[in-house]
Image: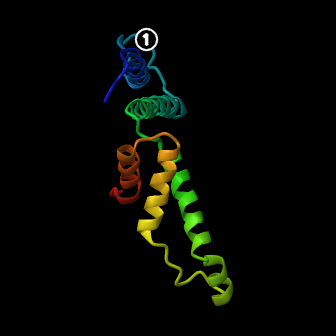
């Protein structure tokens, strides 16, 4: 994974800010610093957002599609499989979606091809789809 030193410094600065917000005052004579819970929560959100931004940047730098691209490819693939296999007619005939099955192999292949068409390598497309579909929660 590639990490930019400037980005790392920014994350460390945010962590120090969070630590400063919740630390005890240095001098006993000064009044205690009251940290509002909302300020501490906001600092944690900023740190989390920066961490996620760094992870997304690393993922993009390594050639991996981001989660939105993977989800869009899967949704597009599902719509294609349903259209191609005549799910609309089957649902209209049965009056329910119960019993409708989507072959995972077809869904995976179409989503992989969609990601490849968007410029990702086959290896990275397959890896991203496997992470999204088969990763444990």
* Residue of label 1: 30
Residue at far bottom of view: 94
Q: Callout 1 environment at 10 Å: few (<14), some (14 to 19), or many (20+)?
A: few
Q: Is residue 119 above or below residue 99?
A: above
Q: Is residue 73 left or right of residue 6?
A: right
The residue lying at 49 percent from left, 47 percent from top is: 115
Question: Residue 6: x, y in percent?
Answer: 40, 14
**Which quarter of the figure has residue 25?**
top left
Residue at far right of view: 92
Q: Nearer the viewer, residue 82 or 20?
A: 82
Secondary structure under the numbered disc 1 in the rendered image: loop
Question: Residue 136: x, y in percent?
Answer: 33, 58
Q: Nearer the viewer, residue 108 or 100?
A: 108
Where, quadrant-wise, is the C terminus in this rendering?
bottom left
Where, quadrant-wise, is the N terminus in this rendering?
top left
Q: Is residue 112 above or below residue 46?
A: below
Q: Is residue 89 above or below residue 121?
A: below
Q: Nearer the viewer, residue 52 or 30?
A: 52
Question: Residue 33: x, y in percent?
Answer: 46, 20
**Which quarter of the figure has residue 32?**
top left
Coloration of the structure image: rainbow
Q: Is residue 81 left or right of residue 133?
A: right
The residue lying at 48 percent from left, 56 percent from top is: 111
């Amino acid at each position: 994974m590639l990490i930019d030193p400037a980005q790392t410094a920014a994350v460390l600065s945010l962590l120090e800010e969070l630590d400063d917000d919740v630390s005890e005052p240095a001098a006993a004579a000064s009044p205690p610093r009251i940290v509002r819970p909302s300020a501490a929560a906001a600092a944690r959100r900023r740190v989390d957002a920066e961490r996620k931004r760094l992870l997304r940047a690393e993922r993009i730098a390594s050639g991996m599609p981001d989660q939105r691209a993977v989800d869009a490819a899967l949704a597009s693939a599902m719509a294609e499989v349903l259209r191609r296999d005549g799910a609309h007619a089957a649902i209209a005939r049965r009056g329910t979606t119960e019993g409708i099955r989507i072959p995972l192999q077809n869904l995976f292949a179409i989503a992989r091809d969609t990601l490849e068409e968007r410029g990702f390598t086959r290896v990275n497309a397959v890896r991203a789809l496997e992470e999204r579909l088969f990763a444990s929660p």
